[in-house]
Image (spheres, grey):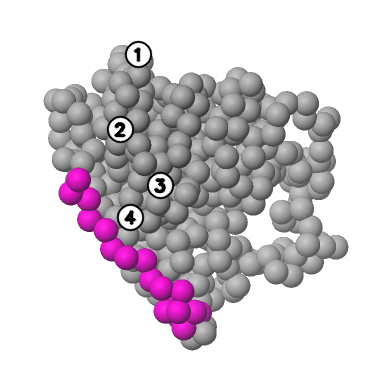
Amino acid sequence: MSATTTPAPSEASTSRHRAEGDPLDLEAVDAIELWVGNALQAAHFYRTGWGFELVGYAGPETGVRDSCSYLLEQGKLRLVVTASLREGTEIARHVARHGDGVRDLSLRVADAAGTFEAAVRRGAVPVRAPWEESDGCGVIRRATIAAYGETVHTFVERRQYGGVHAPGYEPRATVPDPLPPVGALDFDHSVANVELNRMDFWVGFYEKVLGFSLVQGFTDEDISTEYSALMSKVVSDGVGRIKFPINEPAPGKKKSQVDEYLDFYGGPGVQHIAIATGDIVASVAALETRGIEFMRVPATYYEELRERLADLELDVDALERHGILADRDDEGYLLQIFSRMNQDRPTVFFELIERRGSRGFGNGNFKALFLALEREQARRGNL
């Protein structure tokens, strides 16, 4: 494997960095907002299919006139699904071009205005200058910059706000969920697909503008099959809470998964969201009960896995039964699985990942995963 790896900064160096008061010290991913064609139905899908809890709503009944949004939570992960109520709006145009997709990867910060101003000084394109909103639950401050394609990052300062997500939202609950809990814990990473020869530009953007570091890189030799290939680099904040792999297509005999995404999404965007779990076998079993389908690898993968990870106490029979992949590095091992698409277009899907020390991304699974993706592409006639 010819992947390149850069060690993550130490906790000590990160603590010194914070003590200096750098306004670009990002705390966490605050929420992931998807713009969709029908927010009510999308919320129902993520609640019943993926096990999220519906906790908030914003729409005409709460004073929002031209859109409606549903807030869903599971563990520390927050999803917002938003739809337009009128034609010709920015949301409606986005959905017409991209289908259901991630619009905003918002980032929690201590000072939204200060973070925004620092990011713009470093080259970020402003989308919305700092603004604040308040209600009886306090004050929330936000500001937005552009990322790849039509994806944005909103800086969110919510320490003085105790309400449901933001002003304009009200608590919303549904009937108790009778299905088994999924056990998702938190955001692990999200993967961007960008055009050919644009990966390094966006790596540079995250390094220069948000102070991220390059932690891993993969060439088309690492991620390829007989027919197609891609290249990928991973950037991360100082303590590894926010990790953004960035993919671009590589020349091949046929269309790669990144090419297919760019075609159907209409440009760059978020390809998949990885969700951390503490027990992936139990999580996948619960999701299968809920009707979620996953990409599968050939049975020969598990024959080889029994030899490759023979020294680990893994229940390979359970992994094979559910289609879960395994990989290791110098720090430990991980288990992962990838869902089929979450919408009609072959664009956005989810990954589940259980980390047992490893901070990698399943390098040893790239070949098997790529073949599984190609089989899905071939079924759609897009390989």
The residues tagged by marks 1 and 2 sit, at their Cα atoms, a distance apart of: 31 Å
Which residue is under mark 1? Answer: 379
The first of marks 2 and 4 along the sequence is 2
Report x, y in % for residue 280.
Answer: 54, 37
- Look at label 1 and name its amino acid: Arg
Q: Nearer the viewer, mark 1 or mark 2?
A: 2
Which residue is under mark 2? Answer: 307
The residues tagged by marks 3 and 1 sit, at their Cα atoms, a distance apart of: 32 Å
Badge 1: residue crowd in 10 Å (few <14, some 14–19, many ≥20): few
Question: Magenta stretch containing residue 5, yes or no?
Answer: yes
Report x, y in % for residue 339.
Answer: 48, 29
Examine the rendering and report whether any part of residue 97 can be seen.
no
Residue 228 vertical placement versus 61 (above, below):
above
Residue 170 vertical placement versus 271 (above, below):
below
The residues tagged by marks 3 and 2 sit, at their Cα atoms, a distance apart of: 15 Å
Which residue is under mark 4? Answer: 330
